[in-house]
Structures are given as C-alpha cells and as structure tokens.
Image: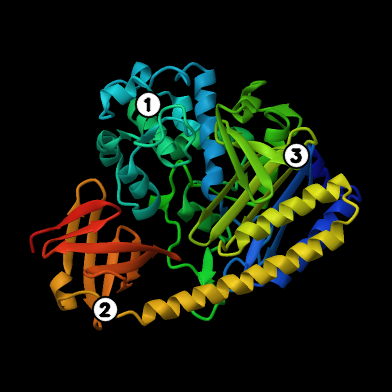
Amino acid sequence: MTAAFFTAALLWGPVASAAPVPGPEARDIDVFTRKALARIGVVPGLSLAVVRGEEPVITAGFGVANVETGVAVDANTRFYVASATKSFTALAIAAMAARGAVELDTPVADWAGSTKLPPDIARSITLTDLLSHRSGVENDPIAFRAAMSGDHSPRLMQALLAETVKSADTPHGTFRYTNTGYNLATTLIEQRFGPDWRALVSREVLVPAGLTQTTAWVSRARRGGVVAVGHTPGPDGASSPSSLQKVDATMQSAGGLMSSANDMARWLELQINDGVLDGRRVFPAGLVDATHRPRVAQKAVFGPYSRDGYGLGWQTGRYGDDVLIHHFGNFAGSRTHVSFMPGRRLGVAIMANEDFMAGELVDLLADYVYDRFAGRPDLEAHYDAELAALAARRDKRLAGLSASRAERAARPWPLSRPTSAYVGTYVDPAMGRMEISEANGLMKVRIGVMSALAEAFTKPETIRVELSPLQGEAITFAGPDSLVFEGRTFLRAPR
C-alpha cells in the first residue's frame, strides 16, 4: 500500500480491497500449521512467511513466544534466525565488492592491509573462499568467542586472527561448513574499513531493503516488540525457556540476526526477483542472483533435500525435481528454515522457538507448502502420515533424553578431591576465562555468558557440562592447576 493510498484510506474510511482475502493455499497452510503444532506439542510457537512471485501468500504467527508469559506470536514477532544470517552477511559483502570496495576473488592480503592473519594464509585465501566454506582454514577461538561465550572486543578479535591455521583434513577448495569463515571475513573488513558487521549488514542490506523489523541487536529487538524465547525440553519433557539465550555479545556475522515473518517475506521477494522489491530495483541487476551460484561442490542429503553446492550464504540443491536455494539455522532452542525455488518463484521462511523437534517440523511445513502448490494428489494423507511418524520420533527422543538424564544422575562422582579444591579461574589466552565455583556442594562452570552445573562423567578427573543445552561437553582436570576444554589447556590463575 502506497503512502498516498494509506492516507486516503484514513480519510475516507475502509476500502474493500485494502486487505486481500486469503487464497485457498493460505487457508490450507494455516490449517495444516495449526494441526502440526498441536500434534507435535513441544514446539511453543513459530512464524511463517510464504511468497510467490512478487506477493506474499501468507505471513502469520502461531503459538506463543514464551511459555512462561503466554504472549502470542504474530507476523511481527522477532525470532532468532541463526545461520540463515549468513545470506545477509554475504550479500552485504557482495554489495561492497560490486562497488569496488573489496575484491571477492583476490587474496585478502591484497586489500586487508596489515593484520595478524598468518601471511601464508592471507596470501592464499579470498573472501569467496571464506563465505563459501572452502577456505581450508580453522580458528576455533574466534568462532567460540563470537557465537558462544560473547567474551570479545574488536581489538581482541583482530589479535585472534593469529590463531588461524590450515585444516589438517579439509584442504583449500574443499567444502566444510563452519562459522569461522564469516567471522574471519567480517573481522578483516572491520579492521580495514571501521564499521563492524552489524553496521555493514544494516547499511548494505537492511536499510535499502526496508527490513525494519530485522536487527543484529537483541536489546533493540526487545525494545521494538515481542521477541521469541528459545526453548528446550525440561526434566519432565515439557518445553521451557533455554538456559542459553542470545544476547547482544553473541550475535555474530555467521548467526546474529533477529527477524519477523513480515520482514522474511520481503527477504524472500528480494531473492526470488533478483533484488527487486515492491516493484523497485533495490540491488544492481544480477547481484542477488550471483549469491545463489554455487562456488564449491558438495554432495549431501539433509532430510528430504539433496545438496550439491554452496554459494555466498546459500546452500544449493533440490527438493524432488525442483532446484532449492536454502539455508537453515539452529541454536540452543531456536530453529529457522529459509528456502525458495527459483523455477517456481516460490519461497518459504519459518522460524521456531524450539530446536529439539522443530528442525523436522519446520522442514515438514515447508515441504507441505511446496507440495500444496505443486498439486500433490495425496497431500493430506501423506502429511498426516508424516505427522504421525514425527510424533513417534518425538516420543522416542524424549524417552531417550529421560533415560540419559537418569543414567547421568546415577554415575559416581569421578573427582578425587573435594569440590573446593577445583574452585578458581582457569585461563586460555585464546579461548578466555573459565570460572569454577561451588554452591551448596555443587560445582558450577561459567565461561562468558555460558554457565551450567557440572555432572559426573565416565572417566576419572572429568566432569560433564551442558554449556549449550542438550550438548554435553567434557572438562578434564589435568592436574591441580589446569584443565582441558575443547582440546585447549586452561591454566589456573593465581588466587
């Protein structure tokens, strides 16, 4: 609706054509989504956008944003999109390259200037390598601090470029999906040009596209409206808010945006129409389409989808006989599915505030949309059977989780000394500071914004922690003054 039309509607009263009546596809999608949420039960809420050509078919919210508050989800509710952020970041960098500010396919050493990146690596990798997961390099500390602990600063991240090493098992030119490439790319760009990745994505993508409900700041999303909270299964199997929620410090270039169904509909329209939105060209012709072109080959199957390549922030592959450009994402209680079919000019974005079962659920909803538009003759019978099978997997998975928790609770405590003997601050210069504390006889572990109570592990002098919910990690006390976590040795700081 144009501004002039909107003003006229206010002056002259309701206009019959202002709100189009949902078509049969939208009504069927709405009905099936409600049925699926009720059947699976553990997913508190989700938002959904479906776009065909230049028009949204449906943008809607379902369920609640937080089981503790009961606030309903609508098309304006912000959800964490996780790794679907990569397509925004990659487009922002591609837009810079289109203006000649950076070069996608020349070594980063040619434009980045003096950095802590090892010189041989700087001379051998490009931005395309980093953005398409073919760089053949690793840097666990920079990725961990950016996405998980949140313990970082621009100066520290630039210093951590020195931790970049060549992968021992994935050489340059070979696909290996990680966050590291995006973190390295935006750290280099920030050091060279100044603005951080948030400012970069906002300037190059969000503002031109009018994505006013999309932000890289959790705090701003909360000030602007309802924010969906990530959920995981509690001890009784019911979903409860995850112990690890995204904060401003852990929003990062490989997974750091919040968005709404309304904005994701605009994002899909941009992708389907090569940068044209609302009938207006927002990005140069060919730029958006170019991000969909695979830069590295892969051969994989992800549920009902085959994957054959990766472009700039997009997986390439197929759903059935149709080419499917897509990217998914998940993190500690959040799950996102974004995909579109260029040939059918049809796209789907679904964001859920749970990821124990929501991964399969949101993919199933997207499949329903594509099959509904394709006119699948056995649509309802097929998807009723799929929902029944998903419910059976839910029951099996919840039973397995309950049994695992009971088994862990029955383990003998494997530490040879009193808990107080392990209390202290342990430091790895690259990974950060880990705090071990004691409260009511229990051991608590904290690193950055992550914290968890320790459980018994299966080997002497080891504990298990879920710093990221449902993902157990071992900590080994290697001596009176050191521990090993994520393959790194942390030394106890002087008391």
The number of numbered badges drawn on the structure is 3
**Place of residue 289 in the rendered image (x, y in percent of width and height, measured from the top left):** 66, 26
> Disc 1 designates what residue?
193
Query: Which quarter of the picture shows residue 4?
Result: top right
In the image, residue 186 above or below residue 59: above
Q: What residue type is labelled 3?
A: Ala
Instruction: State which quarter of the image contains the C terminus.
Output: bottom left
> Disc 3 designates what residue?
3
Q: Measuring 20% from the left and 53% from the top, which residue is drawn there?
A: 489
> Disc 2 designates what residue?
413
| Residue at mark 2 to residue at mark 3: CA–CA distance | 67 Å
User: Element at badge 1?
Assistant: helix
Q: Which of 40 and 386 is in front in this view?
A: 386
Q: Which of 43 and 129 is in front in this view?
A: 129
User: Element at badge 2?
Assistant: loop
Mark 1 or mark 2: name the one nearer the start of the chain: 1
**Place of residue 105 in the rendered image (x, y in percent of width and height, measured from the top left):** 47, 19
Determine crowd level at label 1: few under 14, some 14-19, many 20+ residues with C-alpha closer than 10 A: few
| Residue at mark 1 to residue at mark 2: CA–CA distance | 52 Å
Q: Measuring 53% from the left and 43% from the top, which residue is drawn there?
A: 85
Q: Which amino acid does label 2 sit on?
A: Trp
Q: How does the figure colour the protein chain or chains? A: rainbow
Mark 2 or mark 3: name the one nearer the start of the chain: 3
Q: Residue furthest left?
A: 494
Q: Measuring 60% from the left and 52% from the top, which residue is drawn there?
A: 336
**Place of residue 354 in the rendered image (x, y in percent of width and height, measured from the top left):** 57, 63
Q: Is residue 62 left or right of residue 172?
A: right
Q: In this view, does 68 lie to the left or right of 53?
A: left
Q: CB atoms at circles 2 and 3 under 8 Å apart?
A: no
Q: Nearer the viewer, mark 1 or mark 2?
A: 2
Q: Which amino acid does label 1 sit on?
A: Phe
